[in-house]
Amino acid sequence: MPAAHPDRWWGLFEPTRGPEPLRERDRPVALSPSSLENLVGTCSLQWFLGREVKAAAPATAAQGFGNVVHVLADEVASGRTPADLDVLMARLDSVWDALAFDAPWKSAQEKQHARVALERFLSWHVMDRGGRTPPPPSTAST
């Protein structure tokens, strides 16, 4: 079988170099807790391909759900969006149809779950935490 010959194994080829680096050498690597967990808990090449080169597999509806809720929470925490459920739900509505759910009833169910998650976040966000403040917003893209 010609494809099984070691001369054709991609892992044995010399690394290729592009005309430009994939990232600026002096730019810090932004890590969120979940991306750090992925870096430590999985293959570093897989992390690099997903985070730095954006070559990861397409997101599932569940991942899209999580990403949307996290982005909205980050917008509120950073002050870019008011801590108002109606505003957040309007922003959610503007992107919700781009998430691919298996059935309309599942989309409606998950949207209700997103609403509950945003309500919980807003409750936490506005409560008195005894002088503690939320951490500064992440500069990493989600």
Image (cartoon, rainbow, N blue to C red):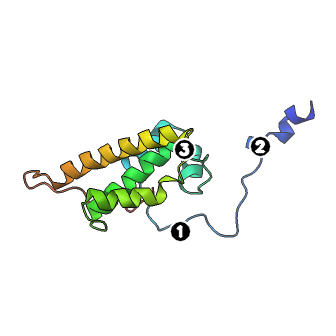
> Which residue carries the number 2 mark?
10
In this rendered view, identify the residue nearer to me: 85 or 65: 85
Left or right placement of residue 5 versus residue 66 in this view: right
Residue at the (7%, 51%) spot, across then down: 130
In this rendered view, identify the residue nearer to me: 112 or 74: 112
Crowding around mark 2 (Cα neighbors within 10 Å: few <14, some 14 to 19, many 20+) is few
Residue 99: percent from left, percent from top: 53, 49
Of all residues, the one furthest to the top in this rendering is 1
- The CA span between labels 2 and 1 is 27 Å
> Which residue carries the number 3 mark?
44
> Which residue carries the number 1 mark?
24
Residue at the (17%, 57%) spot, across then down: 133
In this rendered view, identify the residue nearer to me: 93 or 72: 93
SS at mark 3 in the image: helix
Q: Quadrant of the N terminus?
A: top right
Q: Amino acid at mark 1?
A: Glu
In this rendered view, identify the residue nearer to me: 124 or 138: 124
SS at mark 1 in the image: loop
Left or right placement of residue 102 versus residue 86 in this view: right
Q: Tell me if residue 137 can be seen.
A: no
